[in-house]
Image (spheres, grey):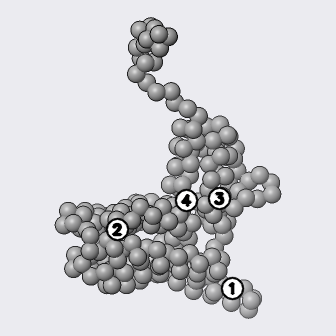
Amino acid sequence: MQKATAEKSDPIAAQLAPVGRETVQDRVYLELRRALIGGLFEPSQVLTIRGLADALMTSTMPVREALGRLITEKALEALPNRSVRVPPITLERMDDLLRARILIEGEAIALAATRMTPRQIATIESMLGEWDEMRALKHKKDVDREVTLNQAFHFEIYRACGSAVLIPMIESLWLQSGPCIRVAIYAFSDAGEIDTAHYHRTIVKAIAAQDAKEARDALVADISRPFTFLRNKLEAEAKKGQSA
């Protein structure tokens, strides 16, 4: 009876669901998660609750809770002064992340290779076209666009694997790998390394042929490259520091 009265007196309220506090928390979490996967934060970068709240134009409570979730997911590390930091790049961490990504993403792409439809294959081929267009532009390299295209390409494939269990595991690994990958993109550019699209074309060719082994091998070559490059870079810097 009271509900019917409320609906008559306030028809807008009757149609809209209340927006709870958790909605803001989820948006903050998803935005920070997107930033980490995209490598917008650098390895070892310290983040403060107040600084993030100001940047996101929200209160500190949803930021604090989002950071707690990301710490649990190993994407961030808690510091004694109530701030957090992006985990630093270490040889041990890179090796561990790469090993996990090869195992899990390798299985996902092997499953997807025999499941992807012609329409899905056309979608990832169109992403290669976008990559070529981006590369054809004469302005400074668009790292944000490159990161976005790379993520879209891989997850379009992974979502076709048919496993609801593998996808969140892969997302967690990308969450932890994001800062490393962005550093590698800049390093590739400076060193004149082969473009990522070269490896993506090999992946598309293998999937079009429904060759699970070739698709897995091509993926391993693709995702191993930034980790190997960074490992060599860190080792060289360590040797240089020891000889100085």
Three-letter code, disc 3: Thr
Q: CA distance from mark 4 to mark 3?
A: 14 Å
| Numbered mark located on residue 68 in the image | none
Quadrant location of the C terminus?
A: bottom right
Three-letter code, disc 1: Ala
Q: Is residue 44 left or right of residue 20?
A: right
Query: In which quarter of the view is residue 148 placed?
Result: bottom left
Q: CA distance from mark 1 to mark 2?
A: 40 Å
Q: CA distance from mark 3 to mark 1?
A: 31 Å
Q: Secondary structure at mark 4?
A: helix
> Is residue 51 shown above or below 59?
below
Mark 4 crowd level (few <14, some 14–19, many ≥20, 10 Å Cα) = many
Q: CA distance from mark 3 to mark 2?
A: 27 Å
Q: Which residue is mark 3?
A: 72
> Is residue 42 shown above or below 100?
above
Q: Which residue is mark 4?
A: 36
Mark 3 crowd level (few <14, some 14–19, many ≥20, 10 Å Cα) = few
Q: CA distance from mark 4 to mark 2?
A: 24 Å
Ranked by sequence position, the earlier of labels 4 and 1 is 4
Question: In the current view of this chain or complex, which residue is farthest to the left?
Answer: 118
Mark 1 crowd level (few <14, some 14–19, many ≥20, 10 Å Cα) = few
Q: Which residue is mark 2?
A: 161
- Residue visible at 67% across and 52% down? 68
Ranked by sequence position, the earlier of labels 4 and 2 is 4
Q: Position of residue 71 (x, y in %)?
A: 66, 58
Q: Which residue is mark 1?
A: 238
Frontmost of labels 4 and 1 is 4
